[in-house]
Image: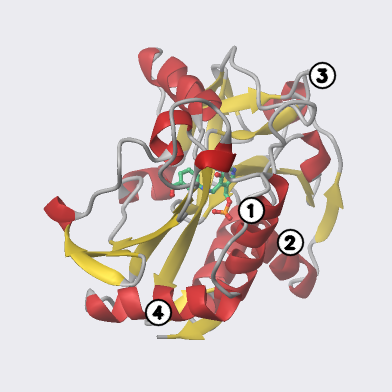
Amino acid sequence: MKVYINGKYYDENDAKVSVFDHGFMYGDGIFEGIRLYDKNVFKLPKHIDRLFRSARAIMLDLPWSKQEIMDAVCDACRTNGLTNGYIRLIVSRGKGKLGLSPFSCSDPQLIIIADQIQLYPQELYDNGLKAVTVPTRRNSHAALPPMVKSLNYLNNILAKIEAQKLGYQECLLLNNEGYVAECSGDNVFIVFENTLITPPVSCGSLGGMTRQTVLELAEKLGIKLVEKPITRFDVWTADECFLTGTAAKLIPLVELDARKIGTGKPGEITKRLTAAFNEVAPLEGVKI
Ligand code: PXG
């Protein structure tokens, strides 16, 4: 695999950034996780728009145009001979002096890793995932805004560790008010009495690309849809639940906090939306 760094390609083992890069020292930088389906980079312009919003929020001036970044992403996919894959796009603040100030940093680094991903085994897509609510809360809007895809994912990582130590692969994070925010790297949907419900991003979730696609598909399929704050009670007593993310796509959640959700099996609306997603995903994107 060849890794793209600032316009050049490096072998995996030679792809390096400085230890003085503030991305490494402080988690000062941003990223995107993008999917390549059948030589189409899924929703690439939307991912790049989100990257620029993250950059604006952390006051990181990007010296590349959106088009230049999109061209680099497509080039990295071609260079690695990919048809399907996962693209990790990273922008770090760049090399600087010791100390928090980013104003000593020059040359933000644009890094593109284009590789394969299989987050969960097929068995979990067929039978569903089990999760637990963890003590770690989602970033607050008053601290690091949860819409920023920053290089500091420690709160999500702590949540993941807590879940795994308890024997679960996935976890639910609440926001500071106790409402459902999202999972460690996925958005959450429930189905209750044939209505699809997901928390608004104001509850602390990231505005996911997969989430947005599912909202659009629900509308097309005539599935009633509501964005409103939800609690753990709503998830425990839902008819269906599923998670969405670029890496996971749609995956059913069949148990939360030792409570079976619905029948304890992936639900019908989950299956319909999964099929619809798998159908549109390779069609919507930028051809490499
Ligand atoms: N919430 C968070 C906090 C995320 O970072 C999602 C939800 C789902 O959004 P998308 O746009 O993917 O539908 C994400 C997505 C990685 C990585 O290593 C990426 C994410 C999450 C965890 C790991 O590339 N991003």
Quarter of the figure that contains the C terminus: bottom left
| Amino acid identity at mark 3 | Glu
Left or right: residue 189 versus residue 199 is left
CA gap, disc 1 and disc 3: 27 Å
**Disc 4: CA contacts within 10 A as few (<14), some (14-19) or many (>=20):** many
Q: Position of residue 115 (x, y in %)?
A: 28, 62
Q: Which residue is mark 4?
A: 74
Q: Is residue 265 visible?
A: no
Left or right: residue 169 versus residue 159 is left
Q: Is residue 133 visible?
A: yes
CA gap, disc 4 and disc 2: 27 Å
Residue 215, numbered circle: 2
Q: Position of residue 69 (x, y in %)?
A: 49, 73
Residue 16, numbered circle: none
**Of label 2 and label 3, which has the lower sequence position?**
3
Up/down of 62 relative to 13, above or below: below
* Secondary structure type for disc 4: helix
**Of label 1 and label 3, which has the lower sequence position?**
1
Q: How is the image coloured?
A: secondary structure
Quarter of the figure that contains the N terminus: bottom left
Q: Residue at x 30, y 36 (%)?
A: 19
Q: Residue at x 32, y 74 (%)?
A: 76
**Disc 2: CA contacts within 10 A as few (<14), some (14-19) or many (>=20):** many
Q: Which residue is mark 1?
A: 55
| Amino acid identity at mark 4 | Cys
CA gap, disc 3 and disc 4: 41 Å
Up/down of 82 relative to 192, above or below: below
Left or right: residue 129 versus residue 181 is left
Disc number lying in front (2 or 3): 3
Up/down of 6 relative to 146, above or below: below
